[in-house]
Amino acid sequence: MRGYDPREIEARWQTRWEQERVFETADPAPDEATYYCLEMLPYPSGKIHMGHVRNYSIGDVVARYQRMRGKRVMHVMGWDSFGMPAENAAIDRGADPGEWTRSNIATMRAQFQRLGFSYDWSREIATCEPEFYHWNQWFFLRMLEKGIAYRAKRLLNWCDRCATVLANEQVVSGRCWRCDGPVRRREFQQWFLRTTDYAAELLDDIERLDGWPDRVRTMQRNWIGRSSGAEVRFDVDDSDLSIDVFTTRIDTIFGATYMALAAEHPAVK
């Protein structure tokens, strides 16, 4: 019996899959069972590692399983190529970020293809390409027109080394998760989205997600949050200053005896 030669056999079948466009997904019929599979878009900051292999192997198993169940599966891949990871990797190597990113995309795509993952490469995207971020800008402009996007001053986590703001989850023991540099608080005029305007609607609609595990729905509820109350403005005596506070018990407001402000509050400065 002839031995198994993975290089010869896998390359032959992968070539055939590509030639016959086996994994390309046509638009489904109205009554056809469908399944959308997306693991996550990787950062194209180098070659793939075993973490990639593990994660995307799991996703490929799910996609193939759903195909075997008779569903039309859209299994897509793209590249999260806008942001600090790709830029920092390019800077470390003295390379042009655009050229470096596109070179890594080509390398990682070839590695994923060699692993035999069943992606519809005709739907590949890269977030650094104008045809993609054009629509990010379009959505933002619509939110700006509707008053959902607004600017305000806020204290944010700032990494001097990366020259960027960080979410609280990206600060580990006072240091940047990306470069391990020190993080300080800095005031910025920043863009925000009024996501709380949709909290009630989002929370109500979670109850309609019958196929979601209870633990995932609980995670979503906790992330969205709901706090009903009132915003009250206090004027400061002998000053043009006013301070806005939020309370869930407006009925007890007449019992308030003092107000505590954070050391970073503009009124304290």
Image (spheres, helix red, strand yellow):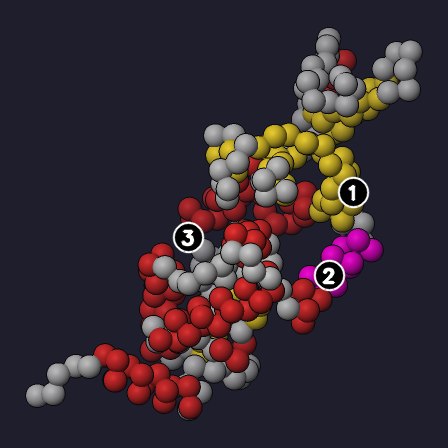
Helix, strand or loop at label 2? It is helix
Q: Amino acid at mark 3?
A: Pro
Q: Which residues are magenta?
A: 135-145
The residue lying toward the viewer, choosing from 252 and 8, is 8
Q: State the separation of the CA atoms marked 3 and 2.
A: 34 Å
Q: Is residue 149 left or right of residue 71?
A: right
The residue lying toward the viewer, choosing from 112 and 119, is 112
Note whether 181 is above or below 212 in the view shown. Answer: above
Residue 33 shows up from this direction: no
Residue lying at 60% horizontally and 62% vertically, measured from the top left: 96
The numbered dot on residue 233 is none
Q: Quadrant of residue 64?
A: bottom left
Q: State the separation of the CA atoms marked 1 and 3.
A: 37 Å
Q: Which residue is mark 1?
A: 151
Residue 72 shows up from this direction: yes
Q: Quadrant of residue 248?
A: top right
Q: Which residue is mark 3?
A: 213
Q: Amino acid at mark 2?
A: Gln
* Dominant secondary structure, magenta: helix
Residue lying at 48% horizontally and 72% vertically, measured from the top left: 106
Q: Amino acid at mark 1?
A: Arg
Question: 10 Å neighbourhood of mark 1: few (<14), some, or many (≥20)?
Answer: few
Q: Which residue is mark 2?
A: 137
Helix, strand or loop at label 1? It is strand
- Residue 145 position within the rendered picture, expressed as x and y whole percent measured from the top left: 82, 55
The residue lying toward the viewer, choosing from 233 and 192, is 192
